[in-house]
Amino acid sequence: MSNHEKSMSKKGDGREQRSEESRARILNSATKIFAEKGLDGSRIDEIAEDAGINKRMLYHYYGSKEDLYVEVLRYNYHKIYAVGKNAFNLGHDPKENVTRAVRAYFYFLAENESFVRLISWEALNRGRYAGKVIPQFFDLVELEFGDIIKDGIKRKYIQPDMDFRQVILSVQALCLAYFNRREIVQPLWQEDLLSEKMLEARLQHILALIFNGIFCHKEE
């Protein structure tokens, strides 16, 4: 490769890196603002200003506010997928795999209030845009973790008639409700529901329900 070609390659790599950094800033700013105001209450000008991006460039990357919103949902669900993927290890004890995955998801929600609020807005809007993301997300999760479930069934840890998607839906409901209903149920406890003690107590309760529901119960 000539010096000129090397120089052009470096410039191209630099532009690509800056483009990726700009997209990441846009998605992070859009996540925050959509979470605060919902899709209808958010403005592209505000997102662009928060991200430090020219509005025309934002439209160049994402086309419209609605398209950006869909990408924000996809971006955040991908983060959940990555968290779950890192928790599973084929060949490990199925109970340990499930424990790690649920713990990772639960604490992801604890640390990402914007995502919790974003999903609450989407539920209020009857899932107008989530339907463009969640089916692919479920397919990806099922494809990635299906072997884990099959392994657990083969080893007689997990009930053979288990519906994988029902399990995912149950885990989501048990975890998500704690955070998007937190301010409503907080008066039932004196301790802060986001304290380390209360978070761990809730997680252990969720794990107990899941283990009782999906794992085989061998006779003593």
Image: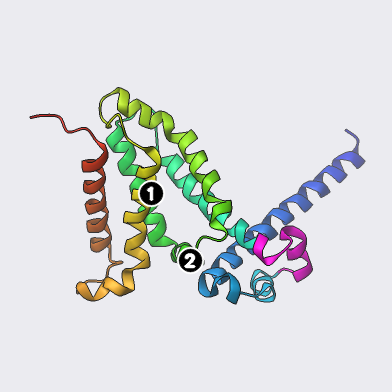
Residue 216 horizontal side relative to residue 152, left or right: left
Residue 101 horizontal side relative to residue 208, left or right: right
Residue 213 picture location, percent across and down = 24, 42
Using a 10 Å C-alpha cutoff, classify the residue at mark 2 as few (fewer than 14 neighbours), some (14 to 19) or many (20 or more).
Answer: some
List the single residue furthest toward the left.
220
Reply yes or no: does residue 62 show up in magenta.
yes
Q: Quadrant of the C terminus?
A: top left
Using a 10 Å C-alpha cutoff, classify the residue at mark 1 as few (fewer than 14 neighbours), some (14 to 19) or many (20 or more).
Answer: few
Q: Mostly what secondary structure, the magenta segment?
A: helix
Q: Which residue is mark 2?
A: 114
Residue 144 picture location, percent across and down = 48, 34
Residue 133 picture location, percent across and down = 56, 51
At x 39%, y 32%, the residue is: 89
Tell us which disc is closer to us: 1 or 2: 1
At x 41%, y 61%, the residue is: 111
Q: Amino acid at mark 1?
A: Leu
Mark 1–mark 2 distance (CA, rounded to whole Å): 20 Å
The magenta segment is: 53-67
Q: Nearer the viewer, residue 142 or 7?
A: 142
At x 67%, y 60%, the residue is: 67
Q: Which residue is mark 1?
A: 169
Q: Please, what secondary structure does the residue beneath circle 1 have? A: helix
Residue 209 picture location, percent across and down = 23, 48
Mark linked to residue 7: none
List the single residue furthest toward the top.
154
Reply yes or no: does residue 35 show up in magenta.
no
Q: Amino acid at mark 2?
A: Ser
Q: Nearer the viewer, residue 65 or 128?
A: 128
At x 32%, y 35%, the residue is: 162
